[in-house]
Amino acid sequence: MKRIALLGATGSIGRQALEIVDAHPGLELVAAASGSQSIDGLAPLTQVGGDLTDLLERAEPDLVLNAVVGFAGLRATLWCLEHGVDLALANKESLVTGGELATEAHARGQGRLLPVDSEHSALHQCLEGRGAETVHSVVLTASGGPFRGRTRDDLADVTPEEALAHPTWNMGPKITVDSATLANKGLELIEAHFLFDLPYDRIEVAIHPTSVVHALVRFRDGAALAHLGYPDMRVPISYALTYPERAATPIPQLDLASGLTLEFSAPDLETFPLLPLAREAGRRGGTYPCAFNAANEVAVAAFLDGRLPFLGIAEVVEEALAAADGAPARDLDELVEADADARRVAERGLQPA
Ligand SMILES: NC(=O)c1ccc[n+]([C@@H]2O[C@H](COP(=O)([O-])OP(=O)(O)OC[C@H]3O[C@@H](n4cnc5c(N)ncnc54)[C@H](OP(=O)(O)O)[C@@H]3O)[C@@H](O)[C@H]2O)c1
């Protein structure tokens, strides 16, 4: 029996994970956490908010699925990696913000780090543990979100409702807005850099509207392996929770005769500047990715509240990055400080001039 702790149990990933756990006799939910919603009785141990590592200390899980949204997931990610507890990671923000500390903790703890993000799960499956030296480059696909094909002018007045209408994935509000701005793909670039030890110039992004190909690895021998499947997060969640078993799921098999279209194009970096801004923050390293993430979290929340126009999200992030010193964080406290500094600058950017 694999003892599972589920952090972010009330969210989009969390609810789908509960379905997978319920259907698999080898998985036992021993602990669950949420941010504010009540989850009494969902698992033998539950916690709402607070320091999630308290719950993990008590639960002694074999595997933690971190499906918390945002920087709030960082402490639990570092705890798992440090303690050698297997981690199924949906909370990409923790690897983006704390990538260096996480890599060091992972090397010490030696537990498994299994990505849940569909593109990174796809890369994990194509790579099968092969090192970065065998890889020429990798490609992360992006649906392009609801605003694919629009110009900057078209985006001036888009509403949260329009941004939340994702064409292929049904997800929580923050990641859905991140998909509309392409910030999500920017976060994923940084996530891939840390997960697979690849430099940024070997991680590409391609727009692929139907989200059937999740990622592709080009190997140094000229072979390219792609991962295909209908867009359904239960596949990567199940892969991570049952690794290396590949348990059965109720997801339909890919039907090549049904008129699948596999189109790819380059992202429009002018209309969606958060993607190149994230790449630049990743390249600069230190706490620049942390500042990118913090300002983006503040700006997305303001957009969803109607306090910031859609195009303002990138402006707020750009200003916060310009104000950040990017100095590397030596520990979690310094990272928390860098996050707080960037949030303060971003909040100032929301005030009317
Ligand atoms: N949804 C997807 O398809 C998808 C795909 C790939 C990656 N991801 C990543 O997975 C993560 C979760 O995404 P989501 O779409 O599932 O988000 P979501 O639907 O907004 O759910 C977020 C979850 O995090 C919990 N939470 C928030 N703050 C917390 C805190 N301080 N302590 C404990 N729990 C907290 C929420 O609890 P409350 O309900 O109580 O607030 C909720 O359970 C994100 O990092 C996202 O980027 C999601």
Image (cartoon, grey):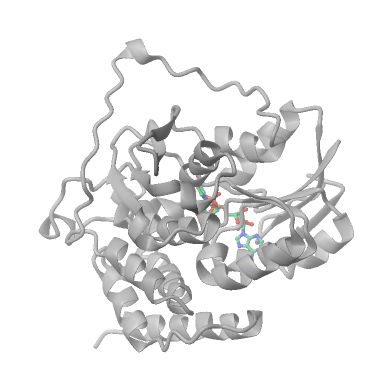
What residue sits 49% from the left and 32% below the top?
232
What residue sits 57% from the left and 37% below the top?
236
Q: Is residue 46 or residue 114 the one in the foreground?
A: 114
What residue sits 27% from the left and 24% below the top?
261
Left or right: where does residue 90 sit relative to residue 268? right
**Would you say residue 81 is visible in this rendering?**
yes
Where is residue 184? Give x, y as percent: 40, 56
In this view, the residue farthest toward the front is 221
**Would you say residue 76 is visible in this rendering?**
no
Where is residue 79? Give x, y as percent: 74, 66
Left or right: where does residue 114 sit relative to residue 5? left
Q: Which quadrant of the picture is home to ligand 1?
A: bottom right
Which quadrant is home to the C terminus?
Answer: bottom left
Which quadrant is home to the N terminus?
Answer: top right
> Number of callouts in the render?
0
The relative height of residue 234 versus residue 110 in the rendered view (above or below) is above
The quarter of the displayed image where residue 42 is located: top right
The relative height of residue 96 versus residue 8 in the rendered view (above or below) is below
Q: Is residue 295 or residue 157 the one in the foreground?
A: 295
Left or right: where does residue 271 sit relative to residue 237? left
Where is residue 233? Give x, y as percent: 53, 37
